Image (spheres, helix red, strand yellow):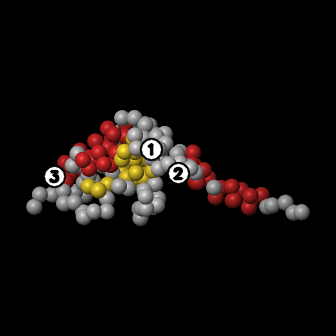
């Protein structure tokens, strides 16, 4: 019997490192885990600033958690980086601050969206953020700081 090449063994082991890191960070759904039922995440969330981003809020629908960029899958919020008008910019800043408050208010879960998408075209993890079985995105929608994802694109500027 021949022994496996040590380089092949190392390469095979390294192929699983990203998956293991995602599972260890709690970003990968576990077998038998009900969507949104494991509220295992808690952190303080400042607004992101500078090139190094670990745990912070980018805008009303995007944040970093332990080095992973997450896009909230069930909402769309006003832009802050390239707003179409001053009203959109102001609403985008309010949505950013509100998301920061909601994430920092206690433990939350991250669920894969019902359609099964796990990444968007920009490489961000797609998740629904939950607390107590309810979407935190729906809070932003109720407060007028977000629109449901998948509907008509909301016009944040006055005509």
Q: Nearer the viewer, residue 13 or 158?
A: 158
- For the point 49% across and 42% down, the residue is 38
User: What kind of element bears circle 2?
Assistant: loop
Q: Where is residue 16 drawn, in percent x and y? A: 63, 55
The residue under label 3 is 87
- Say if residue 56 shows up in the picture: no
- For the point 29% across and 56% down, the residue is 148
Q: Closer to us: mark 3 or mark 1?
A: 1
- For the point 19% across and 48% down, the residue is 90
Q: Where is residue 108 drawn, in percent x and y? A: 42, 41
Exactly how many numbered labels are in the figure?
A: 3
* Residue 1: numbered disc: none
Q: CA distance from mark 1 to mark 2?
A: 10 Å
Number of residues whose C-alpha sits closer than 10 Å to that of mark 1, classed few (under 14), some (14–19) or many (20 or more): many
Number of residues whose C-alpha sits closer than 10 Å to that of mark 3, classed few (under 14), some (14–19) or many (20 or more): some
Q: Nearer the viewer, residue 137 or 27?
A: 137
Quadrant housing the C terminus: bottom left
The residue under label 1 is 109
- For the point 32% across and 43% down, the residue is 99
* Residue 29: numbered disc: 2
Q: Where is residue 102 drawn, in percent x and y? A: 33, 39
Between discs 2 and 3, the one toward the N terminus: 2
Left or right of 98 in this view: 22? right
Instruction: Check whether the beta carbons of the residues at disc 1 and disc 2 lie within 8 A of each other.
Output: no
Between discs 1 and 2, the one toward the N terminus: 2
């Amino acid at each position: 019997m021949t022994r496996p090449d040590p380089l092949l063994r190392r390469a095979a082991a390294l192929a699983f490192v990203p998956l293991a890191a995602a599972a260890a960070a709690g970003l990968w759904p576990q077998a038998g885990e009900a969507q949104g039922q494991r509220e295992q995440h808690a952190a303080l969330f400042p607004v992101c600033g500078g090139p190094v981003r670990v745990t912070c809020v980018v805008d009303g629908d995007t944040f970093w958690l332990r080095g992973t960029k997450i896009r909230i899958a069930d909402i769309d919020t006003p832009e802050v980086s390239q707003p179409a008008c001053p009203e959109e910019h102001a609403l985008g800043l309010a949505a950013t601050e509100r998301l920061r408050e909601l994430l920092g208010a206690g433990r939350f879960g991250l669920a894969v969206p019902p359609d099964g998408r796990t990444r968007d075209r920009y490489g961000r993890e797609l998740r629904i953020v939950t607390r107590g079985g309810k979407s935190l995105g729906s809070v932003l929608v109720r407060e007028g700081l977000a629109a449901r994802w998948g509907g008509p694109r909301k016009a944040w500027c006055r005509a």
